[in-house]
Image (spheres, helix red, strand yellow):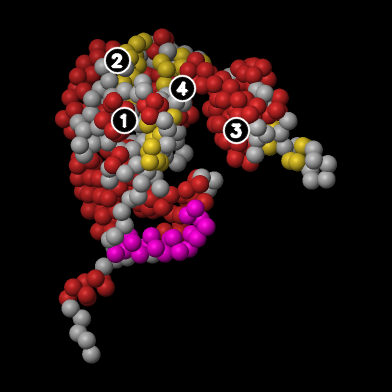
Amino acid sequence: MQQLSLFDLLQDLKPTLELAELFEAYQACRSNKRNTRNAMAFEVDYETNLLTLCADINDGSYQPGKSIAFIVNKSVKREIFAADFRDRVVHHLVVSKLNPLFEKTFIYDSYACRVGKGTHLGIQRVDRFIRQCSQNYTTDCYVLKLDIKGFFMHINKAILFAKLQAFIEQKYLAPDKSLLLELCEKIIFYEPTQHCIIKSKRQAWQGLPPDKSLFYSAPQCGLPIGNLTSQVFANFYMNSFDHFIKHDLGIRYYGRYVDDFILVHEDKDYLKALIPVIKARLQEQLQLTLHPNKIYLQHYSKGVQFLGAVIKPHRIYIAKRTQGNFYEAIVKQNAQVLAQKPGKEQQAAFLSSMNSYLGILKHYKTHKLRKRLLFKNLSARWWNCVYLSGGIAKFVLKIKTVKQGNWRQ
């Protein structure tokens, strides 16, 4: 009988990933990316692909694959790196393990990439901060809004991983701790620029500042915008800073959405004095820089623009940039429908684009604005196959009858 070595025994005791966990991550990923070519290629033989991926993770051979790099222009110009669908499954797996622990440590008023949060809550909360601090607009208070320059491109990977490693060692109690750390390390230190597929034309990068591109990031710095892990790890990276503002500086009225954050206080001089303190903290602890041209400090009555809305006493309205982006999205959809009759993919893209704007606008007094933009500008060809539901709140596809070939609601 062959005697097993100590190494073999230790390998047998090494915690492994269960296929069921990976399947759950696949399902979550699939619900978000089901119609992409990359997702459909994986789905053709998803059982074999998941088995192979599970084996690769367990034996340590898993490595992230090529990303697709491209430029988007709305709402602002950004460089996106879309990970391979296989890697997105791993991202969902990692986030599903860490998010419940992260949520216990995050402050309430961190709004990005969190269930039940988002831009709408961020706008509501800042409006509430101002009302409470000004005692319902009866006393003075001031709003300080700050922005981090080239946030994602300047996240220091070594600092992030050191923080994450300490957090997992302390908070993560499941037996697959070493496996999770290994995956996090591979995701964080992977350099997507070295093996990416360029989808947009080279000219598309013209006008994009270097501090907003991974191609110009310092060595061992930068997380790719577009990955779920990047969004979640960015929140984790800023978590100590959030607690510094809230608890060390004692700012009661504070909220942050990614790299935009707002402080509300009754003393203007105190807020002004905090700017160099915050600047130093970001640089020393996180190697991040305040954007020098995006420092806003004003009386609340002047209003403040935050997350696509303008917050003023007794009212909130949509910023002009958001209105302009909605109009340009309509023009883009019109151009596509004039070129050819919309198929399923074009219809899905139309619903996604239009309903994302309507979803934002419907929360505010924008009925006349929505009505004017849509009924004045949207092509009649789209009205032939869609209709508005809930007033002017959501587009829905009409159903085409088989016998008559007509559209109906």
Q: Of marks 2 and 1, which one's residue comes earlier in the chain?
A: 1
Query: Which SS type dominates the magenta stretch?
Result: helix
Disc on res. 293: 2
Q: Nearer the viewer, mark 3 or mark 4?
A: 3
Kind of residue at disc 2: Asn
Q: Nearer the viewer, residue 116 or 91?
A: 91
Let me know if residue 260 is in the magenta part.
no
Q: Residue at x 45, y 17 (%)?
A: 311
- The tag earlier along the polypeptide, 4 or 2, is 2
Q: Which residue is mark 3?
A: 350
Q: Distance from label 3 to label 1 (Cα)?
A: 28 Å
Q: Give the magenta-colored segment's residue range.
A: 41-59
Q: CA distance from mark 2 to mark 1?
A: 19 Å
Q: Few, some or many C-alpha atoms within 10 Å of disc 4 (few <14, some 14-19, many ≥20)?
A: some
Which residue lies under the disc numbered 1?
213
Residue at 42% over, 17% down: 305
Residue 212 position in % (x across, y down): 32, 28
Query: Distance between the Cα atoms at labels 4 and 2?
Result: 18 Å
Q: Is the residue under label 2 in contact with that under label 4 (CB below 8 Å)?
A: no
Which structural element holds mark 3? Answer: helix
Above or below 42: residue 320: above
**Residue corresponding to mark 4:** 308
- Amino acid type, mark 1: Ser
Q: Is residue 235 left or right of residue 48?
A: left
Name the quadrant containing residue 175: bottom left
Q: Given this view, does label 4 or label 2 mark the residue nearer the observer?
A: 2
Nearer mark to the viewer, of 2 and 1? 1
Which one is closest to the eye, mark 1 or mark 4?
1
